[in-house]
Amino acid sequence: MSEPTANKLRKIEVTATDLPLHCPMPSMLLWNAHPRVFLPVEKTGEALCPYCGTQYKLKGGVGAGHH
């Protein structure tokens, strides 16, 4: 298991295994978290968290999360 990271990362690349995507992600520290929000990154290949402004980019782009 990886060490928790501070919720200060502003650009995160995610893969199909991270779907459905939500912010904060499990690896983020709880003390610096906001309510969980699901982000539809698979629709456009990118998503922006409305709470913390973190940008998520789906590795492989649109369609990468589909079988």
Image (spheres, grey):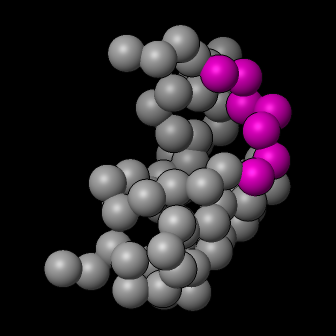
Residue ID at (53%, 12%): 3
Q: Quadrant of the C terminus?
A: bottom left
Horizontally, residue 28 falls left or right of residue 66, namely right
Residue ID at (80%, 47%): 10
On the question of residue 7 being in view, the answer is yes
Horizontally, residue 30 falls left or right of residue 52, namely left
Front residue of 24 and 2: 2
30 falls in the magenta region: no
Residue ID at (27%, 80%): 66
Horizontally, residue 16 falls left or right of residue 35, namely left
Q: Is residue 10 above or below residue 48?
A: above
The location of residue 60, given as percent across then percent down, is 49, 74
On the question of residue 40 being in view, the answer is no
Q: Is residue 23 above or below residue 6?
A: below
Q: Main secondary structure of the magenta part?
A: loop
Which quadrant would residue 19 be assigned to in this image? Answer: bottom left
Residue range in magenta is 5-11
Q: Quadrant of the N terminus?
A: top left
The location of residue 21, given as percent across then percent down, is 44, 58
Residue ID at (47%, 17%): 2
Residue closest to the far front: 60
The location of residue 20, given as percent across then percent down, is 35, 61
